[in-house]
Image: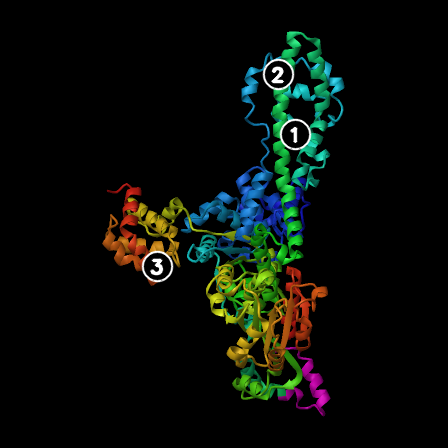
Amino acid sequence: VGSKGRRPFAGPGRARRLTFRHGDAIRILNSSLEPDVNDALPLGGAPLRSIDVVEQGLGEAGYIANRQISTAIYMAHHLQKPILVEGPAGVGKTELAKSVASWLKLPLIRMQCYEGLDESKALYEWKYGKQLLYTQILKDKINSVIGDADDLATALDKLHSFGDVFFSHQFLEPRPLLRSLQEPGGSVLLIDEIDKSDQEFEAFLLEILSDYQVTIPEIGTVGAIVPPIVLLTSNSTRDLGDALKRRCLHLHIGFPDDKLEAKIIASRVPGIDARLLKQLVSFAQQLRALDLKKVPSVSETIDWAKIMLLLHTTVLEVDLVRDTLNVLLKFEADIEVAGKQLAGLTHKARQEAGVT
Amino acid sequence: VATAAPASEPLRRFLQVARGAGLKVSAAEGIDAARALDLVGFEDRTVLRDSLGLVLAKTPEEKAAYEEVFDIYFKRDEFAGGQDAIEDEAPGSDQDPFSSPANGAGGDGMGGQGGQSLGSLLASDDRATLATAMEQAAREAGIENIRFFTQKNLYARRILDRMGLRALERDMEAMRQTGTPEGLGRAQFLDGKVEALRDSVRDFVERNLLLFAKGDTEKFREELLKSARFSNLERRDLDRMRVLVRQMAKKLAARYAKTRRRRLRGQLDTRRTLRRNMGWGGIPFITVWKQKRIEKPRVMVLCDVSGSVAAMAQFLLMFMYAINEALSDIRSFAFAGSLIEVSEILEKQPVEEAITRIMSMIGYGSSNYGNSFADFEDGWMRHVTNKTTVIILGDARGNRTDPRTDVIGRLSQRSKRIIWLNPEYRSAWGTGDSDMYRYAPFCGLVTVCNTLRHLERTITDILEAAA
């Protein structure tokens, strides 16, 4: 099936029958059992029909996406590639994954990266306790099996004939990566802050990113039932390897412009006064132009907007801004720098919003 | 789904152009681009730009370069605007007086236009066809091979020739010969059109020069710089050199930054094994083997900052601080007549500024190696351990002062090894007031070092030696 076969206009039911890829057998099995769930599948093709649909869907999930972001999600699905999302902190990288999941009604499986993260925490672990417990409980059984053996060699032979009972799926504790592959209806896998992990871990991710499969030495290769939509986020605290970047689509999310930011806040803080909104956005945008150690992020502007709503503010006053500035700025030095220009900034914000 | 759609011709050329602009486009990414193109098509330029951008550009710098090159490449409105003034003056543009006489003569090089002559194309002002003709002529002229701006006129001429300009000029000459007001008028009218055509062709060539040659010339220049002597560098190259130094250093740092361990085969680390398996009552499920840590090098850099060695010193220091993470400790000293420690200045300020400051403090004097080494012994010799690598950068020309080889002797015994980098060619060592051969016996390595390549080689050597 070429990529064209899955493109627009085929109705959901038809598309499902036309698109065969690995894991399909299981999915079709599922679909006969629980049809409602299946309608929400991204891989049925219907929800990800076009870029406009993506933009609209994300909007319904409460994420105001620009064109580039929706294009990225659309392409990620159709090319079956992970997206590497980079950008400054607090512009909604993690939020994007959450929104995609909630829009498509897929489970979000999140893996937070940190230094020292290894495969036993990311992929799978053997349930040692269970293994030990079972060997104890089954001691008698094992004795009865090998009890009548005359010598060591026969006993060993008998044991071998049972295969690796203690290294099978029952004793496997799946961690986020493996779980996302085993989700029968597909999933959204969020690998958060990949730049915080070690370089070795990055290399370890390559297999799952390019082929949607992982290899467990004792069991073999486990492929995805339905390839998940994978998002990786990075704050660029270190440069990621070329091999990783090559396997991903690269999306850079910067700070939004004033119109988009206003839309985002309006969707996140319902009931906010339009004129106050304009003032807030203008103020935040001005702060970002200052020479600060850490400029306010979108999430911080949202928090600030919520506070203003709580305080029943309609017009930005210098004193009020001064008191609540610690919501936007998190460094003493930054607050000091901004504090000096507060009157000017507030005035300009009011002016731009047309409030006198 | 993973089968690759064959890259279409425009995409293939675009990828070539993108690579030229400094984007690292691997074959796999090329295939992805083809699949993306297959998905979104050419219709919507912004969607196409976003989609290819997702696949091809993977850093903010690459994104910027990509957008620039995309805009240049997909700008195909050669003949839109700019000619309207001439168009209005066109006398009798509804009739086409050149179609019959020019058709036969204008045939040379006009293969792709279905027999229409350049004259009639210009007169009818058919911009789309003209643009296509130009594109085709350009391809025939091999515009992809343009490399230097000096070739601009050559290629413009070739394209015009292929479009049939020569024949048209002959025709126009013939018209002027007739002497009739009508003939003169037509010739004049065409003159204007031809001028406009020349301008657009020149524009077109220039844009293609930007597209195809930029990457190559940059690369060429960088290769040149890597093996240029530091003392010969021009001021305008310094910025580029700094970028190059950082690139090289980044590569080395990434390779050597980790504390590496070498496993010793078959030697059980009993203590760690017991600790590790405590959860299972000390039954050794997991074995831990003894391992040897590979230490990061500890470096002391002594730089002669007098006279000709100064340029070299700047780059050495820049390099050393750029690979900071691959070293466990670095201390730097600058000397001319006497020696001072400059680690603090270098840590606090960007290297470029720090260097100027150091130079103003101590630089540009006449050097006295003996004196400087004595200073070092008094102040810092006790910090030198058997893990310290000492790098000395200098031409070893002490203006006939006492070289104090005894200090270097003691330093050599205390330290792991001494590396002497000399920016002079080997043939100049030991001539005049050079004491190089007196110091050499105490040094683990004495080498010529006056280009970026030398520098890279030497520093790799230092990092390797730690293993």
Q: Amino acid at mark 3?
A: Asp
User: Which residues, given as a range, are shown in magenta?
Assistant: A143-165
Residue at the limit of the structure toward the front, as seen here: B400
Q: Amino acid at mark 1?
A: Thr
Secondary structure of residue under mark 1: helix
Chain ID of residue with mark 2: B
* Left or right position of B35 against A129: right
Both marks 1 and 2 on one chain: yes
Residue B132's disc is 1
Is there any visible trace of residue B394 in the rendered image? yes
Residue B162's quadrant in the figure? top right
Residue B194's quadrant in the figure? top right
Cα–Cα gap, marks 2 and 3: 67 Å
Compared to residue B179, the image places residue A213 above or below, namely: below
Secondary structure of residue under mark 2: helix
Residue at the limit of the structure toward the top, as seen here: B180
Q: Amino acid at mark 2?
A: Phe
Identify the image's colour scheme: rainbow, by chain, secondary structure or one colour.
rainbow
Q: Position of residue B71 (x, y in %)?
A: 56, 40
Mark 1 vs mark 3: give the one in front. Answer: 3
Q: Position of residue A92 (x, y in %)?
A: 43, 55
What residue is rendered at 72% in x and 92% in y? A150
B194 drawn magenta? no
Is there any visible trace of residue A174 in the rendered image? no
Q: Position of residue B402 (x, y in %)?
A: 61, 75
